[in-house]
Amino acid sequence: MQTDPSNVVQKQVFSLSEITESIARMFAKYYASPYWIRAEISKLNFYPASGHCFPDLVEKQDGKVKSQVRSIIWRDDLFRISQKFEEVTREPLHEGIAIMFQAYVKFTSEHGLSLHIIDIEPLYTLGEMARAKLETIGLLKKEGIFQHNKQVGLPLLLKRVAIISAETSKGYNDLLVTLNRNPYGYHFITKLFPALLQGDAAVESIRKQLIKIKEVIGQFDAVLIIRGGGDEVGLACYDHYDLAREVALFPLPVITGIGHSTNETVVEMVACINKITPTDVAHFMIAGFRSFEDRVQISTQKLFAEVEKTIEWQTAVFNNLVTGFQQSGRSFVKNEHETLEQIGLDIRESVGVAVFNHRIALSRFETALMVHPGQLLGNCRMLLHSQVKMLGFHKTHFINGHSGALDGLGEKVQLLDPVNVLKRGFTITRYKGKAITFGFDPEPGAIIETETVNEKLSSVFAEKKPK
Amino acid sequence: MSKTITYAEAIEELETIVSEIENASIGVDELSEKVKRAAELIKFCRSKLTATEREVGSILKNLETEALEVE
Amino acid sequence: MSKTITYAEAIEELETIVSEIENASIGVDELSEKVKRAAELIKFCRSKLTATEREVGSILKNLETEALEVE
Amino acid sequence: MSKTITYAEAIEELETIVSEIENASIGVDELSEKVKRAAELIKFCRSKLTATEREVGSILKNLETEALEVE
Amino acid sequence: MSKTITYAEAIEELETIVSEIENASIGVDELSEKVKRAAELIKFCRSKLTATEREVGSILKNLETEALEVE
Amino acid sequence: MSKTITYAEAIEELETIVSEIENASIGVDELSEKVKRAAELIKFCRSKLTATEREVGSILKNLETEALEVE
Amino acid sequence: MSKTITYAEAIEELETIVSEIENASIGVDELSEKVKRAAELIKFCRSKLTATEREVGSILKNLETEALEVE
């Protein structure tokens, strides 16, 4: 905007101080009592010489600065506030943290607007840190890389390790001492990659070393992040998303020994192994060697035992086989001898049986010969006898037959004998000695003879009359 | 009666006589003769038969006796 | 009786005679003769049987004796 | 008896004779002869069996003796 | 006996003979012959067996001796 | 015996032979041959076993010695 | 032994060999070879535990030099 210089006098003009003093009066009037305010420290602006601190406060929305104010913590306040803050949050006041603070809103002509912080509520910051940590975990899980480093797999022997630590760190020293003084003579190869291990700068410092290690990844079995011996303040960096992501995605297993007693940080969570103290890490590595050596030892012992057993067993099998061979070879011949002699016995027996059977067959003939001729002759005798009987029988019959026939003839003759006729009263009349027959015609007075049974009658013939 | 007559001849004659008598073709006188002859023949035959029976019987008896002896 | 007659012939003749007597195909006159012949035949057969029996018996006795000796 | 007859032939003949006697298919006249023949055959068979037995026995005895000597 | 006969063949023939004698498929006439043959076969088998025994025995003895030397 | 035979093959063949002899699945005729073969196999196995034992023993002894030196 | 074998592979192979021997799945033929191999593996594993790795050392030296330049 251009201002016409000629117009300047016509207007009421205040000096800067007039204005600032007016504003200061107004602030003093309206902002007399302190307020509780939420903001983020964008820059701490601590001046060690004076001991005062002038933090730049911002409020961001969607990554853009919505509001920005300078603030002041006087030395005396700072000491009290810092002590209380660190006690609760385990973090120093530093850039990037969200705080809830009590402050007077001051406006001075010399410095303009500033917030005079008199108190900070550490519980708010703690809550915010927890929220930020959960956010980091949520993001990593969402990306599916939370378990990534655990899945890389730990080699059997952690022999060559890249160590991210500070050279002067007690933790680093503890680790080296424990590793090198192991009583088993194990040999480890360590390489320090120095880095800041706490505070805001640690995130980038550690990441830088991790990237460096990645370039020579073939040289190492694992990466150790070691911290220890110092205070436990300033570990919020290990909840930082960028660092946690780098660790989770690291192609070598990461082992942490950050050394604190509070809650596990996200880096520890995503690391392949978390061992809290560096000494623990060293013991873990030695234990790995130990168990490897144990395996070798056990295998070696077993090898000795099993080889001996195998040889013994094979020898036993072999000797058994040889014994079996010798026995079977001998018993084979013996059995064959027995078989042969048995055949001899069988022949003797079967010949005996055969001859016996023949004898039996022969004796059957003998028996038949003893019995049958007698039977035959007996039958003949019986037949002969029956002929004799028949002869007697037929003779009688024959004689009787003839006798009967003779009797019949005799009877007939007897019946026809004239004597028998006379007996019935008939008579025979004769003339001149001849019996008269049909045609007899003598002269009357002829003497005729009549024969009866007992006597002969002489009579004179009278006449002849027809019947 | 001739001694040489056989039983068979005797029987034959006898049968002839019987047949003649039965036919009544002979007279009473002849009849008597014939009957007489027949009676003779019958007697002969009977004696012959008896003799034969006796003889045969004796033979058979012997046979049986022998058989008994043998057995 | 001829010596050459066999038992079988004798039996056959005997049977003929018996059958002749049975059938009365011989007369009374021959009966004695026939029976006599039959008796002869019977005697012959009997003796033949006895002889055979004796012979066979002796053969078998020998056989048995030998068998006993052998065994 | 011919020397060339075998045991089997002897047995066969024996069987024929025994069967003839059993079936009475031979007469009294031949009986003696047949029985005599049968007796001869039986004797032959018996002696043959005895001989065989003896021979086999001797062969086997030899075999045993050898076996003992060998062992 | 042919020299080319094997032990197995000999045993087989022996077994055939035994079985023939057992089943009475051998007559008395051949019995002696068969037994004689069997005796020959047995002798043959015995000698073969004895030879084998000796050979096997010697091999086994060698084996034992060697075993002792090795151990 | 072929040089290329392994111990396992030798043992297997040996077992087969022993089992054949045990089960009498070979005849007397083959016995000598089989026994001879078995004896060869046994010698082979024995020497192989002894050699292996010696070799393995020496390897393990070396290993022990080294272990002692290292500790 | 191939230079590229890792100690993990070495111990695994060793354990496999031991287990093979234990389960008698290794015959006499392979035993020597296997034991030889096992001995090598054991030596390798043992040396891994205690030996210094020169190869690695040189590369790390280079790295240190660079690191100094960077800081």
Image: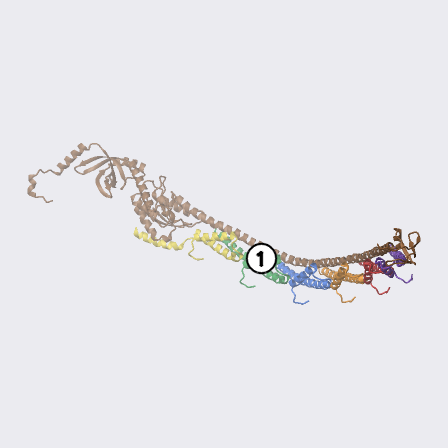
Chain colours: A brown, B purple, C red, D orange, E blue, F green, G yellow
Residue A448, how many percent across, how many down?
92, 56
Observer able to see residue D32: no
Residue G69, how many percent across, how many down?
30, 53
Residue D34, how many percent across, how many down?
79, 62
Along the line of sight, which residue is nearer the eye, B44 or A336? B44
For label 1, count other residues whose C-alpha is less than 10 Å away and answer few (under 14), some (14-19) or many (20+). some
Apparent side of residue A262 relative to residue A103 in the rendered image (left or right): right
Name which residue type carries label 1.
Glu
- Pointer 1 chain: F
Residue A333, how many percent across, how many down?
65, 59
**Quadrant the C terminus of chain A occupies:** bottom right
Apparent side of residue G46 relative to residue A465 in the rendered image (left or right): left
Please say if A120 is above or below D25: above
Along the line of sight, which residue is nearer the eye, A462 or A292? A462
Apparent side of residue A49 relative to residue A12 in the rendered image (left or right): right
**Quadrant the N terminus of chain A occupies:** top left
Residue B52's quadrant in the figure? bottom right
Observer able to see residue A355: yes
Residue F11's quadrant in the figure? bottom right
Q: Residue at the location (48% across, 52% down)?
A: G16
Along the line of sight, which residue is nearer the eye, G17 or B71? B71
How many numbered discs?
Answer: 1
Considering the numbered disc 1 on the image, is that residue within a helix, a strand or a loop? Answer: helix
Write down the residue under mark 1: F15
